[in-house]
Image: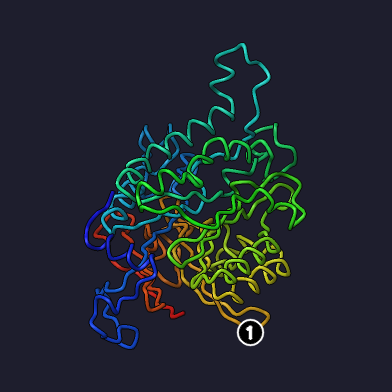
């Protein structure tokens, strides 16, 4: 449990005391904060996604793929370094934005349960095996005092018919069995109040585990622990499943709207949303518009626009992955309100841009990267993206953003 002066200060802030107690009347909110000035810091969290490895289509920089990563299907080296640095940055929370496993199978009980080889080689066993390895990777982060919240990605919930005949449909589509496998392997991380309280001394408040979320948007499968939300230190955090059963690449817009409205009514000052697929595809090619088709929610523009209307109306920041690249962008809703999308699908999966691509941001388009966010008592939110190149050079700041609320 962290008992340093910084933690004590934060607990006073959470209890409702103002920083005037510590600053002898100094008008903190009126002054310009230096980049390294953490006076009045209330909360720090980090976010990243997409660390699963693909030995069949690896990034050239990871060849030869180690035997370990071929077996467990994780970019162990990149993820280990990120987790270590996030811990050094003393992040209170880590939101992991999906595709932590290769998945893409059908997590169904094998037909022959008397044959050990059949069981071991089944998609169900592979899902559990890959989840287990990722859980082992983040276990040290949890024990060091950073609470990890998982976000479902398409590789967790979708079945790819190119990999197995057990998919319900052709192509890539979410399956109920895969959603169940998510809950079985990740559910204990979502609202483990005892563990959370052991770290921070308080529980998250106004928890919603998403049990009722499916009904809002006409989803026919349970979305419990796939959508969920909570309040912590004057901020509201919402996790969404962007590939629900029979509604792939769609956000739960109606549930999200009531979730944010309720949080605002409770007095939440900041709104942070975490999903896997981006609302706006990052077309990173400088010569040709790569990729040539939408990667995320913009496959259905009307639905995407409805989602962005909600995000922008509440001044939320949307963090996402899916594209294996880093990018921060501001977008205007149909209601002429603006909000930021922070794309951090750069956790170790094969980069979107290959080494020969001419890209818009060549200095960062092939960096492993994550974002660390700091929330301050005076309402300011600072986002810094940190990264290192494909050759594992020095970690450095690759982007920054300040938002006032």
Image position of 210 (left or right of 22):
right
Q: At 43% across and 31% down in the image, what residue appears?
A: 71
Q: Is residue 373 above or below residue 62?
A: below
Picture coordinates of residue 342 (x, y %)? Answer: 48, 67
Image position of 161 (left or right of 225):
right
Could one spot residue 363 in this view of the protein?
Answer: no
Residue 36's quadrant in the figure?
Answer: bottom left
Q: At 25% across and 63% down in the image, what residue appears?
A: 6
Q: Is residue 339 above or below residue 245?
A: below
User: Label 1 belongs to which residue?
Assistant: 336
Picture coordinates of residue 131 (x, y %)? Answer: 48, 36
Image position of 311 (left or right of 61):
right
Image position of 27 (left or right of 274):
left
- Give 265 or 357, whichever is nearer the viewer: 265
Q: How is the image coloured?
A: rainbow
- Give 62 or 202, whichever is nearer the viewer: 202
């Amino acid at each position: 449990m962290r008992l340093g002066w910084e933690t004590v200060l934060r607990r006073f802030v959470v209890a409702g005391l103002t920083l005037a107690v510590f600053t002898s009347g100094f008008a903190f909110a009126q002054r310009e904060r230096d980049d390294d000035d953490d006076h009045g810091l209330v909360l720090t969290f980090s976010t990243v996604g997409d660390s699963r490895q693909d030995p069949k289509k690896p990034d050239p920089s990871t060849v030869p793929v180690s035997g370990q990563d071929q077996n467990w299907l994780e970019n162990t080296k990149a993820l280990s370094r990120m987790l270590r640095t996030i811990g050094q940055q003393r992040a209170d929370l880590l939101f992991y934005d999906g595709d932590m496993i290769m998945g893409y199978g059908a997590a169904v009980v094998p037909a022959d349960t008397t044959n050990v080889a059949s069981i071991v080689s089944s998609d169900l066993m592979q899902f559990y095996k890959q989840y287990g390895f990722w859980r082992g990777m983040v276990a040290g982060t949890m024990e060091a005092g950073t609470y990890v919240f998982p976000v479902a990605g398409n590789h967790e919930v979708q079945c790819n018919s190119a990999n197995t005949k057990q998919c319900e449909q052709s192509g890539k589509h979410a399956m109920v069995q895969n959603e169940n496998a998510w809950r079985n392997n990740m559910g204990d991380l979502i609202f483990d109040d005892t563990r959370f309280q052991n770290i921070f001394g308080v529980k998250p408040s106004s928890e919603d585990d998403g049990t009722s979320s499916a009904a809002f948007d006409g989803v026919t499968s349970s979305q419990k622990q796939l959508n969920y939300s909570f309040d912590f230190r004057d901020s509201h955090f919402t996790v969404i499943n962007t590939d629900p059963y029979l509604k792939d690449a769609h956000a739960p817009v109606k549930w999200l709207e009531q979730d944010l409205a309720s949080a605002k009514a409770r007095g939440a000052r900041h709104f942070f949303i975490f999903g896997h697929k981006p609302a706006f595809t990052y077309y990173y090619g400088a010569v040709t518009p790569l990729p040539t088709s939408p990667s995320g929610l913009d496959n259905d523009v009307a639905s995407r626009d409805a989602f962005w209307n909600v995000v922008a109306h509440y001044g939320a920041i949307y963090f996402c992955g899916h594209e294996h690249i880093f990018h921060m962008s501001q977008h205007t809703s149909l209601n002429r309100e603006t909000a930021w999308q922070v794309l951090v699908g750069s956790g170790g999966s094969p980069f979107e841009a290959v080494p020969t691509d001419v890209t818009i941001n060549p200095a960062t388009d092939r960096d492993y990267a994550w974002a660390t966010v700091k929330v301050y008592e005076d309402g300011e939110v600072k986002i810094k993206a940190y990264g290192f190149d494909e050759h594992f050079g020095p970690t450095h700041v690759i982007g920054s953003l300040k938002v006032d609320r």
